[in-house]
Image (cartoon, rainbow, N blue to C red):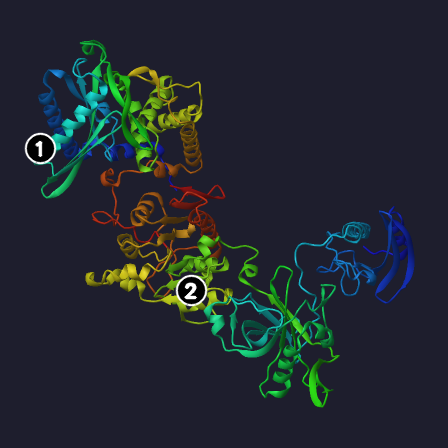
């Protein structure tokens, strides 16, 4: 897989649109060539870097071969060092690598240099993030309920959500909770109540009049460059908070809007030893006045990424008819915990968990619980897990619901609908037949979905209200021939349970949920069904 | 694991839906119908040639859930000026009948396509019961030809979006010829009863008469095994292959001009075909799917040796040790 300079030149000269190739020397790690492209009457030179001692294969997204022209920085896909950012296909021999990269350069010249094409989707600014006190810093933010505009300024509330020390160097991750403009108007992120309520530190924000960037791609890296985008009032505010008030307000969040109006932040930590804004005295007639002036100082910027609900779930989620509902999961064993995490990973914003059971080590192998948390109430641990998965879910836990449903005296029977009517969908994964019957008896607006599984996860049964109890009884009595003699008996107790692994349960639940969601969303006729493996395929058997 | 026996299972299904299990109920139905027939004959006197039971009970194709009882009033040609007068008059009579009978606590009379629905509600030892009776008034085609031909003209009431209008047309039929067509055909009857189980238990909207005629037609040239599964499978395949076939005709034995299949909506024919196709494919890959398509009537299951916990439970719940979460 090695190649020499002469062979590279030989390959390049065979392309009809490369009219000149010159050897431009070498370093310890690179060979360099000047390559002149001629396309559509346009001649354009690139310096081609080839990494020596590397195979033609890419390392991550980095190709062993780069095309550089610093005069093209204003064009799309040209990075700060002038190199073209091309996402080319994988290759395993040098001849293919060179051909693929050269053809990609040609396409780029035609589309962007000659054709003047602009990409429709917005790309975040390239920020050169630095370590703050020896640690990487990552901020996440969401869009907020109140939009602030150019000229606005005030305070930012942010909170640390993790301090990870395992990725490259140590990383501290923060979340921007919200902002308070100088006049008191507040703007909150979309986060769940939990994340909104975490204790917070304060920084400062300034909404700039434009994008703090060069060529719309590279974030500014010097405070003096920001001067034209700030008002005097904003600079005075920052100066006073950083250098006059005793409280420590850092970092500074420099806000700007994307072309489609979305809020973005460039975040910098002012150096404690040097002032980023200085007061400049001038004489106005007989009066002495001062004006804030941004200093020619390097900005210590850190990484910030938008994490709004739509971005967070951009890769895939359940339809809004599910995610915007209030859902209760009754019984959070293997099925219930998987249903809960799936709902939350698929965008659910409001979930209530109900169970009375405690988590034992034996539960961990086929549910969503963790061993490391020790003995816990299942609903309490699952609440923590769900809140750790999504910053957008509000989780409520109810422990005694089964007591109320099954044992409420007649005189208090009306409290049951009151308790349940706040939910749109109730997943009953409790396998409590008495409760299943009790739920069938009450008139509530919620759609009840009953889920259960047979021994060895041979069948999963899904039933929709009304008439769940009769259906489930019929199926388990007449259709399911489970091997009751081959159950798992945990040592030390008489509580036989079904045999099935996490994989067995997951695949059945996920397959069922795929169709359950289609039915609840109206994409498919709602009908009770059973999932069963037949001839090495999962089958959806609908009634 | 023991292989599922489709034949045995289907025989058990037929057993569980047998009418003798609900003898008390059918006796009550028949008694109510006969009482009503007597009242009709008394009221109309010479205008009536005869009254007789028809429908699935008469044809012995009924199953013991959601069934009704039908009877026909054969009127003389000169009894009424028009068929509509005949139908309206019978409706009026039934409406008065319910008002004048003290033992009927409440009843409901409604105009249907060719019949008049009469739901007889009464108390039996303090328990409210219901008997649905379909009364079909018909008039002979020509004066005094009924005894010879058995032909009747029915008033076919138009419906708009399910609402019956007073407008209508005549429809010739021969109810006795319809019943004769199935006479002595016990195998066909079994298949028809199973198809009715499928229709009723899975909530299908296809007319029973279509399923009945399809069965009779499919079995005309059938020379395969005479066990219930082989015959049912053959009929299901026949319906799948012919439901959308425009050259296939299902002629009403009571009126050779009435092609019951041609009168079916094309979308309904396609649905019927795909339902048969789906059912056959499901059964092929998983024979126990039959239990879903043709569930046994749990009230009257054949008694088998069992230690089932459910035995004797008034409110059946799933057996323990089978259902997990």
Residue A54 shown left or right of residue A362 in the figure: right
Taking the image as shown, residue A121 lies to the left or right of residue A499, namely: right
Can you see residue B229?
yes
Residue A77 lies left or right of residue B274; in this view the side is right
Residue A167, placed above or below residue A276: above
> Does any portion of residue A359 appear in the rendered image?
no
Q: Position of residue A61 (x, y in %)?
A: 71, 59
Residue A283 is situated, as x and y percent measured from the top left of the image, at 73, 88
The picture quadrant where one finds residue A86 is: bottom right
Give the label on residue B100, or none.
Answer: 1
Badge 1: how crowded within 10 Å, few (<14), some, or many (20+)? few
Q: Quadrant of the N terminus of chain A?
A: bottom right
| Secondary element at tag 2 | helix
- Residue A111 location, x and y as percent? 76, 50
* Dots 2 and 1 on the same chain: no
Identify residue for label 2.
A362
Q: Quadrant of residue A414?
A: bottom left
**Chain letter of disc 2 in the image:** A
For disc 2, the neighbor class at 10 Å (few under 14, some 14 to 19, many from 20) is few
Name the residue at 12% across, 27% down.
B36
Chain letter of disc 1 in the image: B
At x 33% / y 37%, what residue is drawn? B203
The answer to whether A27 is drawn above or below residue B105 in the figure is below
């Amino acid at each position: 897989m090695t190649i020499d300079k002469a062979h590279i030149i030989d390959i390049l000269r065979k392309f009809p649109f490369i009219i000149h190739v010159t050897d431009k020397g070498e370093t310890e790690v690179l060979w360099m060539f000047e390559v002149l492209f001629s396309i559509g009457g346009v001649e354009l030179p690139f310096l081609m870097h080839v990494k020596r001692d590397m195979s033609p294969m890419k390392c991550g997204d980095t190709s062993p071969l780069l095309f550089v022209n610093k005069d093209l920085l204003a064009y799309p896909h040209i990075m700060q060092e002038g190199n073209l950012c091309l996402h080319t296909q994988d290759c395993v021999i040098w001849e293919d690598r060179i051909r693929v990269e050269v053809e990609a350069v040609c396409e780029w010249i035609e589309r962007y240099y000659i054709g003047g094409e602009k990409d429709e989707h917005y790309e975040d600014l390239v920020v050169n993030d630095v370590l703050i006190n020896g640690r990487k810093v990552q901020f996440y933010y969401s869009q907020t309920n109140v939009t602030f505009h150019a000229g606005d300024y005030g305070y930012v509330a942010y909170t640390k959500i993790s301090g990870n020390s395992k990725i490259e160097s140590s990383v501290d991750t923060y979340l921007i909770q919200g902002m308070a403009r100088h006049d008191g108007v507040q703007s909150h992120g979309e986060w769940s109540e939990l994340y909104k309520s975490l204790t917070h530190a304060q920084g400062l924000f300034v909404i700039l009049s434009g994008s703090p960037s060069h060529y719309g791609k590279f974030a500014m890296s010097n405070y003096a460059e920001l001067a034209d985008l700030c008002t005097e009032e904003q600079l005075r505010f920052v100066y006073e908070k950083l250098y006059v008030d005793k409280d420590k307000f850092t970092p500074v969040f420099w806000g700007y809007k994307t072309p489609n109006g979305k809020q973005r932040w460039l975040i910098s930590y002012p150096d404690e030893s040097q002032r980023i804004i200085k007061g400049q005295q001038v004489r106005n007639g007989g009066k002495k006045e001062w004006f804030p002036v941004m200093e020619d100082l390097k900005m210590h910027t850190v990484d910030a990424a938008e994490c709004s609900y739509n971005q967070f779930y951009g890769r895939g989620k359940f339809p809004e008819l599910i995610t915007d509902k209030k859902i209760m999961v009754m019984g959070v064993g293997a099925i219930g915990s998987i249903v809960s995490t799936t709902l939350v990973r698929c965008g659910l914003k409001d979930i209530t968990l109900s169970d009375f059971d405690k988590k034992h080590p034996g539960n961990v192998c086929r549910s969503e619980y963790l061993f490391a948390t020790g003995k816990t109430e299942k609903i309490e641990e699952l609440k923590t897990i769900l809140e750790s998965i999504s910053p957008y879910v509000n989780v409520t836990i109810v422990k005694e619901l089964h007591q109320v449903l099954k044992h409420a005296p007649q005189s208090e029977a009306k409290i049951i609908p009151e308790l349940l009517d706040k939910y749109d969908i109730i997943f009953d994964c409790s396998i409590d037949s008495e409760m299943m019957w009790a739920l069938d008896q009450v008139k509530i607006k919620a759609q009840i979905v009953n889920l259960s599984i047979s021994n060895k996860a041979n069948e999963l049964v899904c039933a929709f209200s009304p008439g769940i109890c009769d259906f489930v009884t019929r199926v388990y009595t007449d259709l399911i021939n489970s091997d009751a003699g081959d159950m798992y008996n945990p040592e030390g107790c008489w509580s036989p349970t079904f045999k099935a692994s996490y994989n067995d349960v997951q695949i059945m639940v996920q397959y069922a949920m795929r169709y359950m969601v289609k039915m609840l969303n109206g994409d498919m006729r709602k009908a009770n069904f059973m999932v069963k493996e037949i001839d090495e395929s999962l089958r959806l058997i609908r009634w | 694991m023991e292989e599922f026996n489709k034949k045995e299972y289907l025989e058990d299904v037929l057993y569980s839906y047998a009418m003798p299990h609900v003898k008390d109920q059918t006796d009550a139905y028949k008694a109510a119908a006969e009482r009503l027939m007597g009242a009709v004959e008394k009221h109309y006197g010479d205008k009536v040639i005869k009254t007789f039971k028809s429908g699935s009970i008469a044809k012995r194709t009924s199953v013991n859930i959601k069934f009704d009882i039908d009877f026909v009033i054969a009127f003389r040609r000169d009894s009424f000026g028009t068929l509509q007068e005949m139908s309206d008059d019978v409706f009026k009579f039934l409406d008065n009948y319910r008002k004048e009978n003290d033992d009927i606590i409440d009843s409901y009379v409604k105009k249907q396509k060719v019949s008049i629905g009469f739901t007889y509600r009464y108390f039996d030892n303090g328990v409210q019961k219901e008997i649905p009776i379909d009364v079909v008034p018909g008039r002979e085609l020509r004066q005094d030809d009924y005894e010879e031909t058995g032909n009747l003209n029915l008033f076919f009431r138009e419906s708009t979006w399910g609402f019956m209008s007073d407008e209508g047309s005549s429809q010739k039929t021969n109810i006795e010829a319809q019943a004769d067509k199935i006479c002595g055909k016990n195998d066909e009857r079994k298949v028809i009863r199973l198809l009715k189980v499928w229709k009723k238990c899975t909530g299908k909207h296809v007319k029973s008469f279509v399923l009945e005629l399809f069965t009779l037609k499919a079995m005309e040239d059938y020379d395969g095994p005479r066990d219930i599964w082989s015959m049912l499978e053959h009929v299901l395949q026949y319906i799948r292959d012919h439901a959308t076939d425009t050259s296939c005709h299902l002629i009403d034995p009571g009126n050779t001009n009435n092609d019951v299949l041609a009168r079916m909506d094309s979308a309904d024919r396609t649905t019927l075909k795909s339902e048969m196709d789906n059912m056959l494919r499901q059964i092929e890959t998983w024979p126990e799917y039959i239990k879903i398509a043709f569930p046994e009537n749990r009230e009257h299951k054949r008694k088998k040796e069992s230690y089932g916990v459910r035995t004797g439970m008034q409110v059946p719940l799933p057996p323990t040790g089978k259902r997990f979460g």
